[in-house]
Image: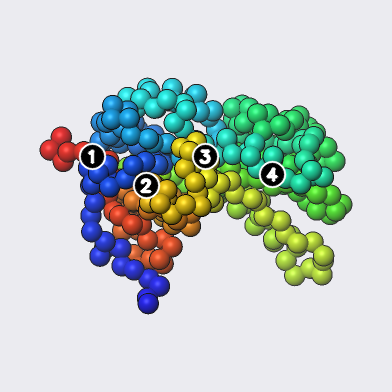
């Protein structure tokens, strides 16, 4: 069997088809319901419909810049009525990640956080203590990349890099955690912005370059990704829905709607639920490409979440 599928052969699906086929809808946020210019056409009506029909749904978003409460307020300003309980961010997975570490490497975890003040709140909620801006590398156990929006971006990333090099060369452990592996996102029509995955890529690439070709026992470290395409965020959604991630019949009830192949679609496919790619975000670039099976969505939604094409 061929391992590639031409996505153009996939039959177009509509938001109405989605609602009749699935019991539970998981939605990515940026590129699916909103972009930086406002709500994406059709998204307000779609969310209103989910609320009114009591359809179970969650927003699964790779991000740790805003707490669910702030995200809910941010959506509300755009006309999207999404209660905070319906929002799962990758930042909220930090606690589960820390809780599952070996007892020996757990607390106190002193973290250097790249991100917003609310990113630091996520780290504190997860049980970490926040390293002060000038903390020496001996006193930092973890680097958490939460968001590109850090008001001291350059000093903080320099501090993170210096800490990585120091601890590597002194054989000291260091947890590297990335709560949003996306490298970029759509900010508007034909306009994109970088995000925290790109920061991790910069740090990893500097470390690789520094030790490349040297006879050394240093293994270049890499960041652990908490968000999509990893399964942790889907497992959390299933936990909150009371569904069993090991049960095929539960998985068949759920679909993930996203705009990015490498996070939303790959994540859903790896986890074993159906996926739908909207043509309203980053994903539209990829609609005609030959794709590996893991990157092929179950459905394509050319009109995004629009319930009626006449409006
Ligand atoms: Mg997106």
- Closest to the observer, 13 or 310: 13
What residue is rendered at 42% in x and 36% in y? 58
Q: Residues within 10 Å of mark 2 (few under 14, many from 20)?
A: some
Q: Is residue 36 left or right of residue 50?
A: right
Task: State the residue at coordinates (79%, 61%).
Answer: 218
Q: Give me the residue at 37% from left, 71% from top.
A: 4
Q: Nearer the viewer, mark 3 or mark 1?
A: 3
Q: Nearer the viewer, mark 1 or mark 2?
A: 2
Can residue 302 be seen from the camera position used here?
A: no
Mark 3–mark 1 distance (CA, rounded to whole Å): 29 Å
Q: What residue did someone put label 1 on?
A: 306
Which circle marks residue 39 in the picture? Answer: none
Q: Earlier in the sequence, mark 1 or mark 2?
A: 2
Q: Quadrant of the N terminus?
A: bottom left
Disc 3 to disc 2, C-alpha distance: 14 Å
What crowding class fits label 4: few (fewer than 14 Cα within 10 Å), some (14-19), or many (20 or more)?
A: few
**Secondary-structure class at tag 1:** loop
Q: CA distance from mark 1 to mark 4?
A: 40 Å
Q: Which residue is mark 4?
A: 100
Q: Position of residue 27 (x, y in %)?
A: 39, 41
Where does residue 198 sit, x and y in percent of width and height?
A: 56, 49
- Cβ–Cβ below 8 Å for labels 3 and 4? no
* Residue at (23% x, 55% y) in the render: 12
Q: Name the residue tied to disc 2.
A: 253
Q: Give the residue at mark 3.
A: 239
Q: Reading the chain from its start, which is encountered first: label 2 or label 4?
A: 4
Q: Is residue 138 left or right of residue 219?
A: right
Foreground residue among 283 and 108: 108
Pointer 3 or 2: first along the chain: 3
Residue 188 as seen in the image, left or right of residue 49: right
Please state, as top left, top right, bottom left or bottom right, where the C terminus lies in the image.
top left
């Amino acid at each position: 069997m061929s391992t590639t599928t031409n996505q153009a052969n996939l039959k177009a699906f509509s938001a109405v088809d989605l609602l009749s086929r699935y019991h539970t809808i998981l939605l990515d946020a940026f590129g699916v319901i909103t972009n930086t210019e406002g709500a994406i056409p059709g998204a307000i009506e779609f969310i209103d419909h989910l609320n009114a029909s009591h359809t179970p749904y969650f927003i699964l978003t790779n991000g740790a810049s805003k707490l669910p409460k702030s995200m809910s307020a941010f959506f509300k300003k755009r006309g999207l009525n999404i209660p905070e309980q319906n929002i799962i961010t990758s930042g909220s997975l930090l606690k589960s990640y820390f809780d599952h570490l070996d007892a020996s490497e757990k607390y106190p975890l002193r973290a250097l956080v790249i991100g917003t003040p609310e990113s630091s709140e996520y780290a504190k909620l997860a049980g970490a203590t926040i390293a002060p801006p000038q903390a020496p590398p001996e006193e930092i156990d973890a680097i958490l990349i939460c968001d590109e929006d850090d008001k001291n971006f350059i000093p903080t990333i320099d501090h993170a890099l210096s800490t990585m090099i120091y601890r590597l060369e002194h054989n000291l452990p260091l947890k590297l955690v990335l709560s949003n592996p996306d490298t970029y996102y759509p900010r508007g029509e034909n306009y994109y912005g970088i995000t925290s995955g790109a920061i991790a890529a910069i740090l990893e690439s500097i470390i690789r370059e520094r030790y490349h070709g040297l006879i050394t026992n240093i293994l270049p470290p890499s960041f652990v990704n908490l968000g999509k395409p990893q399964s942790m965020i889907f497992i959390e959604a299933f936990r909150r829905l009371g569904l069993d991630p090991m049960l095929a019949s539960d998985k068949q009830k759920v679909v993930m709607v996203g705009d990015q192949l490498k996070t939303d679609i790959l994540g859903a496919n790896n986890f074993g639920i159906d996926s739908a790619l909207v043509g309203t975000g980053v994903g539209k670039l990829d609609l005609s490409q030959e794709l590996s099976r893991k990157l092929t969505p179950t459905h394509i939604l050319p009109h995004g979440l629009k319930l009626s094409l006449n409006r």
